[in-house]
Amino acid sequence: MPTLRFAAPLVLGLSAVAALAAAPAPERLPPTMRAVAIDRTGGPEVLTVHRLPVPTPGPDEILIALDTAGVGPWDLEVREKLAYYREKSFPVVLGVDGAGTVAAVGAGVRDFKVGDAVYAYAWDNPQGGFYAEYVAVPAKAAGHVPPGMSLRDAGAAAVTALTALQGVDDALHLKGGETLIIHGASGAVGTLAVQFAKLRGARVLASASGADGVALARRLGADAAIDGHHGDIRAAAHEFAPTGADAVLALAGGDALEACIDTLKTGGRVAWPSGVQPPPKARAGVATLKYDALTGPAEFARLGAAIAAAKLVVPIAAEYPLAEAAQAHERMAAGHVLGKVVLRIR
C-alpha cells in the first residue's frame, strides 16, 4: 500500500514541476534604463537619451518591457510646450502608447502575468512616457495583444486603434449599409477606421492625402477614395451617396472637412477626436460629437475582437530606433505621414 499512498502526491508534484518549467521566468530587472526625455521644451534637438531609474509598478499597475512605442502629433506639442500635460518636472519622458511584454505586476493585478504580450495607452502617465525601455502603467490602461498580431503592429496601433474603433462604434454608432466619409483616411487613425467601418458593414468614401494616400485607402477596403487636398469632395460625395452621406469621421480639420460635412443628409452626424483643429463648425440638422479614446478591460476586449475579425493591417510610415526619436519627430513634422511612425525599443 505504500506505493498507492504516495502515487497521487508524486503525480501532483511532477505536474507542479512541469507547470513551473513551462512558466516564463521573471525578467531580472536592471536598476536603470535608457529613455528619451526632454530637460526643456524646444525643437527636436531637446530629445536626448537619458539613463533613468526603471519605474516600480504600484499595486494596480504593470511594468512593461517595451518593444515598440508610437509617435503621435501630440508628442510634438508636448516637446514644444508641454501641451496637454498637467504639472511636470523635468526630465519628461514622452510617448503615450506602445507594446511589449509584462516584466512585473503590482500586488493587486489579476488580469496580467509576467511574460504576457500587451499593448497600452496612458495619457500624461504619472510614471512617465513610452519613449523608454520600460514603462509602468495602470493595468486598466493595457490589453492583451490579439493572437497573431506582432508587438510592432500592436505598439503602432494602441491609441490609434482605440480612437478609430470608438469613433466608428461609440461616437457615430455606425450601422451596416450606412455611408461614411472618413476625412484624413490615410493617417494613423484613418487607415484603421477604414477597416473597422468596413467590418461594421458600412460603405466608405475615403478623403486621403495625395495619390499614394488614395491608393492606400483603396487597398485597405475603402469603396471610393479622393485626394482631400486637390479633389472635388462635394462632387465625389454626391456620386458616392446621391441622397447625402450618413456620417463623417473627421480626423483633420479645415475647408476640406467642411466640404465633407456639406454633403451630409439632414440628420447626419459628425464625430471627431480631441485635437482635430480647427474643429468642425456647428450647423443645423447635423449632430456633432467630440470624443476621446477610452481604456479599460471592456474597451480592450472589444478592440481585440475587432482587430482579429478585420484581420487588421497597420500601416507603418517609418520606424526609428529609440535613440533617433528626434529624427522621428522631424519626420512627423514634415507631414504626409501615411499610417504611423514608431520607435523600436528592442
Image (cartoon, helix red, strand yellow):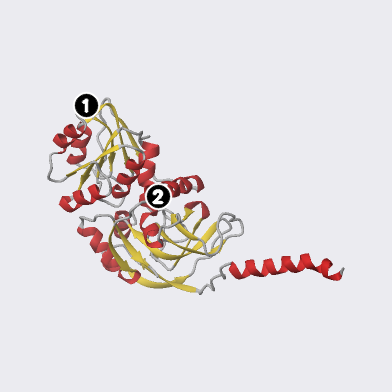
Q: Is residue 226 left or right of residue 202?
A: left
Q: Residue at (59%, 55%) from the top-left corner?
A: 110
Q: Which quadrant of the view contains residue 73?
A: bottom left
Can residue 291 be seen from the camera position used here?
A: no
Of pointers 1 and 2, the one earlier in the residue sequence = 1
Q: Residue at (52%, 60%) from the top-left corner?
A: 62
Amino acid type of the residue that numbered disc 1 sits on in the rendered structure = Thr
**The disc label shown at residue 331, or none:** none
Q: Nearer the viewer, residue 92 or 181?
A: 181
Spatial CA distance of label 1 from label 2 is 32 Å
**The disc label shown at residue 243, or none:** 1
Q: Residue at (20%, 32%) from the top-left corner?
A: 262
Please state the horizontal and vertical placement of residue 60, each as a whole percent of the image: 56, 55
Q: Residue at (40%, 54%) from the top-left corner?
A: 158
Element on which disc 2 rests: helix
Please state the horizontal and vertical placement of residue 230, each as a whole percent of the image: 12, 45
Please state the horizontal and vertical placement of residue 85, each as a whole percent of the image: 38, 54
User: Dot 2: few (<14), some (14–19), or many (≥20) neighbours within 10 Å?
Assistant: many
Element on which disc 1 rests: loop
Amino acid type of the residue that numbered disc 2 sits on in the rendered structure = Ile
Figure quadrant of the N terminus: bottom right
Q: Which residue is mark 2?
A: 307
Q: Which quadrant of the view contains residue 43?
A: bottom left
